[in-house]
Amino acid sequence: TDLMSRRIVGAQINDVQGSPFQADLTFRGFRASGLLGASQGLSVYLDGVRVNEPFGDVVNWDLIPEFSLDSLTLVPGANPAFGLNTLGGAISLTTASGVTAPGVRADLTLGSFGRRRLDFSFGGSDGDGWHHYVGGTWFGEQGWRDHSEGRLGLVLAKWGHTGERSGWDLSVLGGRS
């Protein structure tokens, strides 16, 4: 959500919960929020799967693996091809694979109020078209006010094959927040 607020004209972020993983995205007056009861109007897709919750259409931003995002596409305007409540547009997020993110990567971030975050990934591919990718993030903080500590853990594993005319991926995403 931070990248979207910096790069997409018309996108605004509100941090209403005090957590960097519970943002409220507004684009041209339409929202994709993690708060139940907030008016929604943006559809969010991760690797082609809609991540808006069926009840209330909320988006759990904390379960989006931002450490492994490869591309982001915003399609503005109402379009029935993206499903119900796509009044303001659709956001399509694509995760990395062993082809697009080969090698090992690790990032460690430390901050005030006991904030710590570790992002890691490992990807690779061979000459026959097979590829694999494993990545994850761990986040913890004490919080800046009493009783506001937060924890997050996500793991994404992806395996697939890319041929001359076709390709497929099998992805597993697990998280706890």
Image (tube, grey):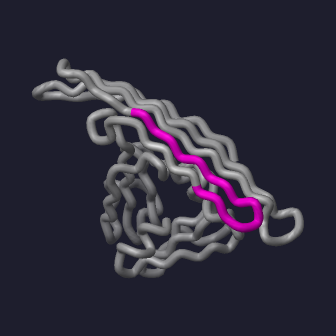
Which residues lie in the magenta part? 109-122
Residue at the far left in the pictured view = 164
In magenta stretch: residue 3: no
- 115 is within the stretch colored magenta: yes
* Helix, strand or loop for the magenta stretch, by majority: strand
Query: For this view, does 102 lie left or right of residue 69?
Result: left
Residue 164 appears in the rendering: yes
The spot of residue 83 in percent (x, y) is 41, 54
Horizontal side of 29 relative to 97 (left or right) equals: right
Q: With respect to residue 54, does 163 lie above or below?
A: above
Q: Is residue 129 left or right of residue 54?
A: left
The residue sitting at 46% across, 38% down in the picture is 121
Give the tally of numbered discs: 0
Q: Tell me if 115 is positioned left or right of 32 in this view.
A: right
> From what the image shows, is residue 8 above or below residue 110?
below
138 to 170, vertically: above or below: below
Q: For the view shown, which residue lies furthest in the top direction? A: 128
